[in-house]
Amino acid sequence: FMRKALLYGYTASLIILLGIGILAIMAPAGTNWPLSIFILAGIVNFICIALYVRFIQTELQQPLSDMADWAGEIRQGNLRARLVEQPHSSSGLIDDVNRASEWLEALAEDMEGQLELQRKNLESKTRSLQLLYDVVRGINFATEVENLISRLMHTSADAVGAKAASARLKNQV
């Protein structure tokens, strides 16, 4: 609303200024009133321009500057950065940007959760492969059954975090 009012006011003052300029040119010699009105219209026009510049500064430049600051925060890894809602702003742009920030933050948290799950899965697979390697190595280096069983018990106890392990062999005759 304010933008339209300023734009219409500025346009009207330019038209008035142009009309008064034409009247001043056509006025009979020795009349000073067109010049006074022309100066007054110039002052009104200057005020309208100043108000329009102020409007551009508050309604366009400041939000863009805020967005640049927000983008810098996001680039530096602060995904909790949000734009502050301006009380006089009727644009939904700030809401959209804040929703995008929330989406980015949720996406990053989800990716971190998936990464942690995959890391744990990889650790589990690595432990399983290490256990298998230890068992195969024990089988390859064992020369006696007792030595093989002893190595397997130590490997099994280490794998499950037990303090001790035992095995009982039974002869079938």
Image: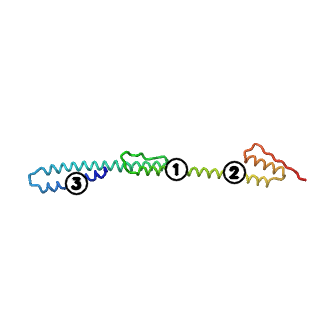
Nearest the viewer among 126 and 116 is 116
Contact between labelled residues 3 and 1, with CB atoms less than 8 Å apart: no
Q: Earlier in the sequence, mark 2 or mark 3?
A: 3
Name of the residue lying farthest toward the top: 163
Q: Secondary structure at mark 3?
A: helix
Q: CA distance from mark 2 to mark 3?
A: 82 Å
Amino acid at circle 2: Arg
Q: Does dot 2 land on a helix, a strand or a loop? A: helix
**Could you tell me which residue is drawn at 46 percent across and 50 percent down?**
99
Query: What SS does tag 1 mark?
Result: helix
Sequence-wise first label, 1 or 3: 3
Residue shown at the point (58%, 50%) measured from the top left = 113
67 lies left or right of 106: left
Please name which of the two marks, 2 or 1, marks the residue nearer to the observer.
1
Q: Which residue position holds label 2?
A: 127
Residue for badge 1 = 106
Q: Residues within 10 Å of mark 3 (few under 14, many from 20)?
A: some
Q: Amino acid at mark 1?
A: Ala
Residue 172 image position (x, y, % from top left): 89, 53
Q: Rate crowding at label 1 as few (under 14), some (14 to 19) or many (20 or more) other CA atoms within 10 Å.
A: some
Label 1 – label 3 distance at C-alpha: 52 Å
Pick the residue in front: 137 or 111.
Answer: 111
Q: Disc 3 designates what residue?
A: 14
Q: Amino acid at mark 3?
A: Leu
**Colour mode of the rendering:** rainbow
Label tally: 3
Q: Is residue 8 left or right of residue 32?
A: right
Looking at the image, the residue that sits furthest to the right is 173
Q: For the point 13% across and 56% down, which residue is it? A: 25
